[in-house]
Image: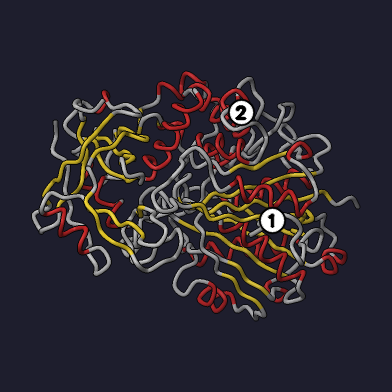
Amino acid sequence: MAHYGAPLVSVRAKAHIAGIYEHPGREIPDQTIPQIHAQVAQGALADAGLTLDDVDAYFCAGDAPGFGGLSMAEYLGLRLHHIDSTEIGGSSYQNHVGHAAQAIAAGHCQVALVTLAGRPRTGGAGPGGSGRISSAPEAAFENQYGMSVTAGYALAAMRHMHDFGTTSAQLAEIKVAASVHAQHNPHAFLPDLVTVDEVLESPMVSDPLHRLDCCVITDGGGAVVVVSPEVARDLDRSTAVVLGHGFAAKHADFGRIDLTHTGAVDSGPMAFAEAGINAADIDYVSIYDSFTITVLQTLEDLGFCAKGEGGGFVSDGALQAPDGLLPFNTDGGGLCSNHPGNRGGMTKILEAVRQVRGEAHPAVQVPDCELVLAHGTGGSLATRMGSATIILGRVDT
Amino acid sequence: MSELPAPAPPVNIETEPFWAATAEGRLLLLRCDDCGAVIWYPRSICPNCRSSTTSWFEASGRGIVYSYTVVRRGQGRWREAAPYVVAYVELEEGPRLLTNIVDCDPDEVRIDMAVRVRFDPTGEGPALPRFVPDPSAH
């Protein structure tokens, strides 16, 4: 069964991201979750020059309260022709953009709204967005052993180190690069520069991952508006054109789990094939960064370096904007800025759109940024996980 | 060495034989009668060939550590148990399963270390398969 190659109906250039919005808050004790969804929805639509009256398709994931899309459609007073509540954890939002582009390409809708909101910091939820749901068929065989979110990623990191000689200092370089970028983001939860030594000296949470290998836990939200080319043409705002999308569900097969690769080995080639480009063509990447190891494995699996060579690749400032080999997460990412609702997929899209629009902070704006990639990871790493990749392009006006 | 919590697992009609055997100190696995795949976790369909004809057999209980982590900060009832080891053990029969490595210094655990199963009673019938170092292995 062929997974790659051109799909029957390609989304290439069939849809544009016309509006984005990121909630500036990282602790939001005074707003409800629906209220945050509404604020980011209106923010993204205003960025595009549209309103809630223009929306005919709505996309949300498990962070939307109550009956998900139906509850939020009623709360916002939406009149919908299309709805999609695909829930694949933190990678949901990349998939929503892909699905919105597919629906637009197929003529089902013109203006698709995607929202995310969550309050794990002040709302009492524990760390981790994936949850280990007690009704899951695997639950009895995994939940009895003191597993934690961090431990899931640590197991992957430990095996990667064993197989490829990856070091904690190399993983720390990823946090350092994020912190270099976060200095320029006034909303970043951790705005201070950190060093490799500071990462290595931070308390061990779950070997080999230190506290500073982990992303932040923040309240927040974000939204994206995906529109048809016809709608995009009539807007005053510059857009990012959707060029490709790929998705993969990786799981433990029947107990033959390989912890050293992620679903990006499948979602990446699908997205690149649809866009008709290669990894070498990409000017900027937003890489899901729940933990430093998430970034390292994903970069390898997307083909930015060979499998096992991620440790060397991320050293010597390769990820640092504007002059690194492959600038990443220039807003500070989930490692330093924001990981709203324990789901980092949305903010990855937002910074990719800023970059391709030329609207990132001047200190981290990648020069001549034409092609960008935003990758989402959902669930855990390399075990039971969603991977979703989108590729966006600059629209010259 | 602190005692780890041994919470009783949820048992259903697909997994009841597995958990009943743990109470007797036996580790059962399912093998597909059609394709021969050894299946983990237990379920009524073979995820390799989609056959619904499978048979239980007793595993050797021996394996090696595929990967591990020392959890320094446990959550909930695991807070006081830390540091403890969560690991994937690769059984001789092939499957890699999530478990704890016990009866050893957490800092002594290594990938490829030989281990064998031990059953920790939950107090409600089923026992949890955990693994201990197996110095007799070669």
Q: Amino acid at mark 1?
A: His
Q: Depth check: B25 or A159 in front? A: B25
Q: Image point 35% across, 51% down: which residue?
A: A126
Colour mapping = secondary structure
A83 vs B128, nearest the viewer: B128
| Residue A248: x %, y % from top left | 58, 54
**Residue A142's disc number:** none
Q: CA distance from mark 2 to mark 1?
A: 29 Å
Chain label for disc 1: A
Lower sequence index among marks 2 and 1: 2
Q: Is residue B121 above or below residue A181?
A: below
Q: Picture coordinates of residue A341 (x, y %)?
A: 48, 54
How crowded is the residue under tag 2: few (<14 C-alpha within 10 Å), some, or many (20+)? many
Q: Identify the secondary structure beneath mark 2.
A: helix
Asked if residue A24 lies left or right of residue B70, the reply is: right
Residue at coordinates 38% horizontally, 66% vertically from top-left? Answer: B45
Q: Residue at x 75, y 61 (%)?
A: A48
In this picture, is B15 found above or below A210?
below
- Tags 2 and 1 on a common chain: yes
Q: Nearer the viewer, residue A146 or A216?
A: A146
> Secondary structure beneath disc 1?
strand
Q: Quadrant of the N terminus of chain A?
A: bottom right
Mark 2 residue type = Val
Label 2 sits on residue: A180
Left or right of A395 in this view: A373: left
As displayed, is residue B14 above or below residue A325? below
Q: Residues within 10 Å of mark 1 (few under 14, many from 20)?
A: many
Q: x, y percentage for residue A352?
A: 70, 46
Horizontal arrangement in the rendering, residue A160 relative to residue A234 (left or right): left
Q: Quadrant of residue A315?
A: top right
Marker disc for residue A245: 1
